[in-house]
Amino acid sequence: MASPHTIVFDLDGTLVDTAPDLITALNHVLDREGLPPVPMASARNMIGAGARKLIERGLEAEGRSVTPADMDRMTADFIAYYADHIAVESRPFEGLEAALDHFSAQGHRLAVCTNKLEWLSKRLLDKLDLSRRFAAICGADTFGVQKPDPTIFRETVARAGGAVKSSIMVGDAGTDVGVARRAGVPVIGVSFGYTDVPIAELKPDRLIHHMRDLPAAASSLMTG
């Protein structure tokens, strides 16, 4: 059996399919500005860089821009609405909990490293009864930096009680591959998440198409 590792997960599009509730919150904000909704299918790939960037991308889709003060107001409106509707339709990806069970049984540590705000991340995972599975849940505001800055990865691993040299990143987008490369750790890409650049093109060390394949992919990196 491989020595204990820290498996670090992205949240949106990796652990949980959060797109329905995020896009509903985005469209709530756009509606209040008198703008048409963004279709769910096209909006999925706008997710992943935080609330502010999601709103910016939603506005860009309509050829609009706003002042910094208006963006601050819209972001606050988004967060307030999203916090109250955070797990209406959001669900863990199929096979996730079995994969987490496998890692826990093998003695590995689990952590979350996301560009979502920490308190929103914890609220979502609490609602889905997943928080208890993770030794650390760290967001964009936890250490004052976001992925792909490697500081957020290193500090997340430290908070989980692990060592960077024995850790693996799991994510769906360029920020996840980027943070892993900068931290000097291997990365597993998931093909079912949210990204404007297909994850395969970013050349993660392993690529999976379903959570059932995660344990084997992680094991191959631990022993390779």
Image: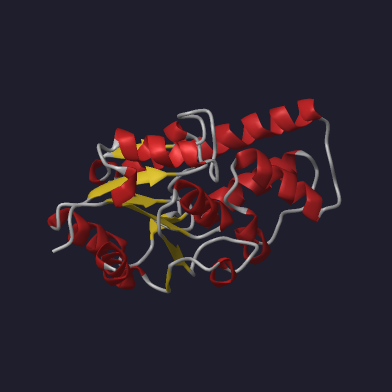
Q: Nearer the viewer, residue 65 or 164?
A: 164
Q: How many marks?
A: 0
In the rendering, at what x and y percent does residue 135 appear? Answer: 26, 40
Horizontal relation, residue 176 to residue 57: left or right: left
Residue 160 in percent (x, y) is at 28, 38
Colour pattern of the rendering: secondary structure
Q: Where 69 sits versus 36, above or below?
A: above
Q: What is the x, y in percent for residue 51?
A: 61, 40
Image quadrant assignment for residue 219: bottom left
User: Which residue shows up at 65% across the image and 59% down it?
Assistant: 43
Residue at image position (38%, 72%) is 210
Q: Quadrant of the N terminus?
A: bottom left
Quadrant containing the C terminus is bottom left
Q: Is residue 202 left or right of residue 92?
A: right
Q: Is residue 159 visible?
A: yes
Q: Is residue 12 left or right of residue 35?
A: left
- Residue 134 in the image: above or below residue 209: above
Residue 199 versus residue 88: which sits nearer the camera?
A: 199
**Vertical relation: 79 (above or below) 173:** above
Residue 122 in sight: no
* Percent x, y of residue 53: 67, 43
Residue 161 to residue 208: above or below: above
Look at 34% across and 44% down and name the residue there: 164
- Left or right: 154 with respect to 1? right
Residue beneath the point at 67% across and 48% down: 27
